[in-house]
Image (cartoon, rainbow, N blue to C red):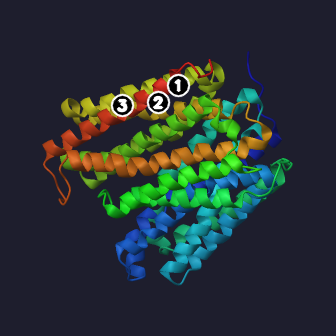
């Protein structure tokens, strides 16, 4: 039976959410290309300018669950509009920053705005789109996120060449203003959800500090794990235990106990983190293998790496439509199956077939990831009570971000150790190939674990 098309008002509202997720994703990647320019402009070392990127990611990771809860508590429309305004103003402050540390502070504010936008866009889907079209809408949001992430480096390079480093932040100001205006005019009002007790400030603070400790433990040292990393990781574990104790006693917990008691949703969150860990491995390991083992030039490496984001952009919306047709459970199995085959192919095919083998594996892995994302998100958000949509969406995005951080550190360290590249700028091609194979066999194991979680008896049919 043919599904009815979205109404005009629904399309415009969905368009505002697409722009919102596009801006937030663009902010995660557009500043990376500017780090050498910023180091020169502010006469600062790399260890200092990398905080322009890290401050944004830490703000998102540490605050996204809290802002999701606040969206449920204060009203999602009200907070989403405030997040768009904050992101836009912070983008202007970034462009006008006279010192590096003011720029880093402005990036942290921009990250707070992005956290609100990321957490509440998915939660808003059920407010504006019929249930039969929810998969397509989530797939479209996934496409916009992929486009934003992929567009960042290339757009940033063009803007820096034409207008200097300030241009990469100025570009978000008019687009942010347009997004805010469109959202204000089209998004429906969402009432505050009455919740017992008072604002869970202690829970939000402990969770934020715990996530900052974990993110720093995974990112400091650039792959070398020392006493500082170990101490931060122990602090994160202790902080998470303390957070659970606080939530068990809170009158209005930021993390509802009903979510913790739902094994199907918990499995979905864990699977989301495992899959994101694998996808980050392709971005970390891929460039080294293509350049040092296959001998591609910088232009060739860039061309091959463009394939993944391009496939993500092209497959996001079709993946959502497939979820609507097959259902979340079946589509998740297919997506994880494609990813499993793709990860094994990445470990095996490039050795005999070179770039063609690598590209063929990416053609399997990336659409599988988009299908998994749309289906898993649909399965997790299905039948979530109205007063928990924001926090559930926030936890879903948090699991993805933690997976990306873990992938960058753990999978990167696995590759570096197995390829014997610690302390070396160039390793032997054979060693790089071995490191890549071991890393993606480990990645296949993580995807298999995610598939087992989905097939567990407690999963919904």
Disc sitting over residue 450 in the figure: 2
Q: Give residue 54's position: percent from left, percent from top.
A: 47, 64
Q: Earlier in the sequence, mark 2 or mark 3?
A: 3
Q: Residues within 10 Å of mark 3 (few under 14, many from 20)?
A: some
Q: Secondary structure at mark 3?
A: helix
Q: Residue at x 19, y 30 (%)?
A: 352
Q: CA distance from mark 3 to mark 1?
A: 14 Å
Q: Residue at x 52, y 68 (%)?
A: 168
Q: Give residue 440's position: percent from left, percent from top.
A: 31, 36
Q: CA distance from mark 2 to mark 3?
A: 9 Å
Asked where in the image residue 281 lies, by quadrant, the reply is top left
Q: Give residue 246's position: percent from left, percent from top.
A: 65, 52
Asked where in the image residue 126 lies, by quadrant, the reply is top right
Task: Name the residue beneath numbered marker 1.
Answer: 454
**Which of the image's four quarters has the N terminus?**
top right
Disc sitting over residue 445 in the figure: 3
């Amino acid at each position: 039976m043919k599904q009815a098309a979205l109404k005009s008002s629904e399309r415009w509202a969905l368009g505002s959410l697409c722009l919102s997720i596009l801006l937030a994703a663009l902010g995660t990647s557009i500043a990376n290309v500017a780090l050498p320019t910023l180091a020169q402009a502010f006469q600062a070392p790399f260890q200092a300018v990398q905080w322009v990127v890290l401050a944004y990611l830490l703000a998102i990771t540490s605050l996204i669950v809290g802002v999701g809860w606040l969206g449920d508590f204060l009203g999602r429309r009200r907070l989403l509009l405030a997040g768009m305004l904050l992101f836009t103003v912070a983008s202007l402050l970034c462009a006008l920053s006279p010192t590096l540390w003011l720029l880093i502070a402005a990036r942290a504010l921009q990250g707070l705005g992005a956290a609100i936008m990321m957490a509440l866009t998915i939660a808003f889907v059920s407010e504006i789109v019929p249930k039969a079209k929810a998969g397509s809408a989530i797939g479209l949001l996934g496409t916009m996120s992929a486009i934003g992430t992929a567009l960042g480096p290339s757009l940033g390079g063009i803007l820096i060449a034409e207008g200097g480093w300030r241009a990469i932040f100025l570009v978000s100001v008019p687009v942010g203003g347009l997004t805010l205006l469109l959202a204000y005019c089209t998004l429906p009002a969402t009432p505050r959800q009455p919740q017992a007790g008072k604002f869970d400030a202690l829970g939000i603070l402990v969770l934020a500090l715990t996530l900052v400790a974990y993110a720093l433990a995974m990112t400091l040292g650039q792959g070398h794990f020392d006493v500082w990393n170990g101490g931060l990781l122990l602090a994160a574990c202790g902080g998470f235990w303390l957070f659970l104790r606080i939530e068990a006693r809170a009158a209005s917990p930021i993390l509802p106990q009903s979510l913790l008691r739902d094994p199907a949703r918990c499995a979905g969150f864990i699977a989301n983190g495992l899959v994101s860990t694998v996808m980050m491995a392709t971005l970390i390991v891929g460039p080294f293998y293509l350049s040092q083992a296959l001998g591609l030039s910088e232009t060739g490496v860039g061309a091959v790496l463009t394939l993944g984001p391009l496939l993500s952009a092209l497959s996001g919306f079709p993946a959502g439509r497939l979820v609507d047709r097959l259902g979340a459970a079946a589509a998740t199995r297919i997506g994880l199956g494609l990813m499993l085959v793709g990860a094994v192919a990445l470990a095996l095919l490039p050795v005999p077939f070179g770039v063609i083998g690598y590209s063929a594996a990416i053609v399997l892995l990336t659409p599988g990831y988009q299908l998994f994302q749309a289906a898993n998100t649909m399965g997790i958000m299905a039948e979530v009570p109205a007063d928990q949509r924001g926090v559930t969406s926030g936890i879903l995005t948090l699991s993805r971000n933690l997976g990306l951080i873990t992938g960058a550190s753990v999978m990167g360290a696995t590759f570096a150790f197995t390829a014997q590249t610690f302390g070396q700028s160039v390793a032997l091609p054979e060693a790089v190939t071995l490191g890549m194979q071991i890393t993606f066999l480990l990645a296949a194991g993580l995807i298999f674990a995610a598939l087992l979680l989905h097939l567990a008896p407690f999963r919904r049919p």
